[in-house]
Each structure stands twice: as structure tokens, then as C-alpha cells.
Image (tube, helix red, strand yellow):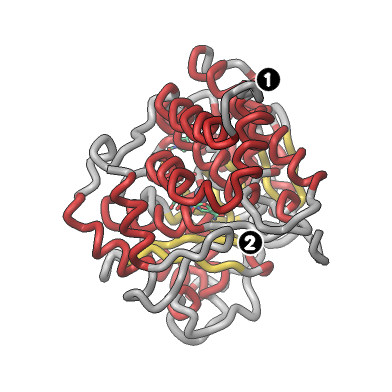
Amino acid sequence: MKNFVFKNATEIIFGKNSERFIGSKVKKYADKILFCYGGGSIKKSGLYDRVVDSLKENEVEFIELSGIKPNPRLEPVREGIKLCRENNIKFVLSVGGGSAADTAKAIAVGVPYEGDVWDFFIGKAKVKEALPIGVIITLPATGTESSNNSVIMNEEGWLKKGIATGYIRPTFSIMNPELTFTLPAYQTACGAADIMAHIMERYFTNIKNVDLTDRLCEAAMKTIINNVEIVLKDPENYDARAEIMWTGTIAHNDLLSTGRIGDWASHQIEHELSGQNDIAHGAGLAIIFPAWMKYVYTHDINRFVQFAVRVWNVELAYTSYEDIALEGIKKTKEFFQKIGLPVTLKEGNIDESKIEEMADKCTNNGTQRVGQFVKLNKEDVINILNLAK
Ligand code: NZQ
Ligand code: ZN
């Protein structure tokens, strides 16, 4: 196990009706806030009205930034920064999915910075401060409710890039599984794939003697596998929704990374898929992850055997370790298929003629490698994308 520092200061307020505390929670930080949300799901579900009522009851003024799209764009971030500055706003609240939260996070780092916020995403500047952020999350997927990441898309060049800094971990996140009852099956499945991917990125590591975090990862993956099929059949099953929601947070709050080094190549490759083709991040991961696994499994066949046996219950009586490892990969792909996700570029309507372009972007024109478990160059990325056809 490697040395590590673990600090995740986000306060989690979890459970039925937890959003009713929003006004009093926010009031501790500010009297006036920016309120970010997406394309209207929170209005349809009635959550918007409950949030507004609670803010008003607690005499919190708010300015709205609405219409944030999936694969959130840079322009609303710049608009939000302007609104905060013009109105002397010192707190950002996001209500909705990861795209609204990531927009809020990017605004939070942009307000105190004199240059253009995109500088942080291209490594031209380092985050040194940020406004505090609060989140009500309605889609278990990204783990953004307590992660140190924000991922934003710049339409100029269709560049989807992320930042990672402790300054953007939300001060609090409100998580009510009932708020996820309205999720369409496809978004539920995309969320499950993203959660699985966050765990698998950490699971496939070269660090030895990480038994506790291996077992935690396996438990988290099994929880998703067991519960996603329940909610797809019974969307208002509170207990199953709650299991998925909490696992989504645990998957990406860095607990499962303690003492180990994760891979993250599949995420980097996927960001090119959703950046170029505007598909859901979870769907892109369902396409890339099984292809990545097929490409790298021989690097540490024992780890893939452990994954197959412990996560997918593959019997050790198969003829060879290789067969067991491959069976685990097959079961991963079948799981994504079964929950209704695309598992090939074709099924995801990804333009195959852009494979080289995506590999170029992902590796900074072939100058950088991606991933840690196996460090991949541009040719490797092209091979993985070809395997995903
Ligand atoms: O926009 P609205 O109307 O709210 O509808 C959204 C959107 O259409 C809808 N939705 C959300 N909650 C709902 C709901 N519909 C009905 N009922 C509900 N309860 O779902 C659609 C997708 O929402 P979005 O916020 O885009 O999805 P998600 O939470 O999966 O976020 C994806 C983004 O996060 C990034 C991804 O790359 C992608 O851009 N990621 C962020 C990470 C982080 N900050 O830590 C890590 C991840 O790996 C990921 O890269
Ligand atoms: Zn992800």
C-alpha cells in the first residue's frame, strides 16, 4: 500500500426529504447566491418549487443560471462568473445532475480569478481559491457531489477537459434517493455505468497489497450490479435507489483510491467520445471500458481473474486463467448491454472516421501517454477504439 493523505470534507445530508434543509444550510454561508440548474427536470419534478420556497423562507436571495446542458459548456460558466461578480455573490448552489454541479464548480473557481476560467482547464493557471459550493444531486453517477473534479466542454474545438482541486469539493451535498425516482431508464443506466467505471478505474492498479480497498471496490461494484436491475424494473424502489446513490458517492470520493494508483485511461478516452459526439458520459464508458479491458488484461492476468471471480462469480474451474479473465470481461460487457447501454462505437452512433482525431486529442497529438495500469500511446488508443467498433 502506498502512503496517502485522505481528506474529504463534504458534509453529506442523505435521506428522505433532506432537501427541505436547503434554505437554512445555505443561509450559514450567504444571504445571496447563484442558483444553477439544468434543462427543466427539477421544475417538472417539483423540486425547484421546494428549493425556492425554502430559500425564501430563510431570506436567501438568488439569481438563476438555468438551461445547463449535459456535457456542460464553457459559455454558461463565463456567464455565471459575470453574474456573481456583478451581484457580489459569494456562494454557488447547484440543483440537478453532474453537469449543473460541474458548472457551479467551474464558476466557483472563476469568480476570484482575474484571467479566463478556461486557463485552469488547459493547465495555464492553478486554482488557489474558490467560492463555496452547495449541491442537491438528482442523478447518481459522477460522484461530483463530493469529488474534487469539474469537467467542462469548450465548444471551440470540442475540447472536454477537467480540473481536480480540493477547493471545489462541495461544502455540503444533499442526497435524497426519492429525487432519483423520475430518472429515465437510460439515465439510470448511464449513471450505473459511470459509477462502475469510477470503481474499475481504481480497481485496476499496479500497487500490491491493497486488500482492503480491493474488497471495498468489489462490494461497491456488486452493490451496483445487484441494485440497478431492481430500479430499472421498479423505479420507485427507495432502498435500491438509496444503495445506488450512496455507492455513487463512495465510488468517487477518493476513499477507494487510498493507498493505490488508479488508471483513468478509459475516462480520458471517453471524454473524447462525449466531447466529439455529445453522447452521455456513462454510455461512452460502457463502450470503452470492455475494449480497454480486452486490450490490457494480459498485463496482470491475476488481477483480472480476481475481478472475474469476486465480482462476476466466474467459477475457478474454467480451464485456464486466461479463460476466467476473459469471462469476467465478457460479463462486464453483457451487464452494460443488459441495462440498455451501447457497447460498440456503432451502437453509440460514434463517427468511426474520427478515431485518429480522438486519439490525437486524447494523447495531445501523440506527445502524452494516458493511463497508469498500462501507459497507452496514441497507437494503443487507436487500437482500443478499433476494438470498440
Ligand atoms: O438538465 P435536466 O433537465 O436537469 O435533465 C438532466 C439531463 O438531461 C437529466 N436528469 C438529471 N436528474 C434527473 C434528470 N431527469 C429526470 N429526473 C432526474 N432526477 O439527466 C440528464 C443528464 O444530466 P447530467 O447532469 O448531464 O448527467 P450526469 O450527472 O451523468 O453528468 C455528466 C457530466 O459529468 C461529467 C461527465 O463527463 C459529464 O459531462 N463527470 C464529472 C465528474 C466529476 N465532476 O467528478 C466525474 C465523471 O467521471 C464525469 O466525467
Ligand atoms: Zn465518470
Helix, strand or loop at label 1? It is helix
Residue 304 falls in which quadrant of the image? Answer: top right
Q: Nearer the viewer, residue 136 or 219?
A: 219
In the rendered image, residue 239, in percent from the top left (x then y), is placed at: 68, 20
| Mark 2 closeness class: few <14, some 14–19, many ≥20 residues within 10 Å | many
Residue 148, numbered circle: 2
| Mark 1 closeness class: few <14, some 14–19, many ≥20 residues within 10 Å | some
Mark 2 within 8 Å of ligand 1, using the beta carbon: yes
In the rendered image, residue 311, in percent from the top left (x then y), is placed at: 64, 30
Residue 239, numbered circle: 1
In the rendered image, residue 155, in percent from the top left (x then y), is placed at: 28, 65
Q: Nearer the viewer, residue 199 or 17?
A: 199
Q: Nearer the viewer, residue 157 or 177?
A: 157
- Height in image: 98 above or below 127? above
- Height in image: 204 above or below 178? below
Residue found 65% across the figure and 43% down from its top: 302
Residue 31 falls in which quadrant of the image? Answer: bottom right
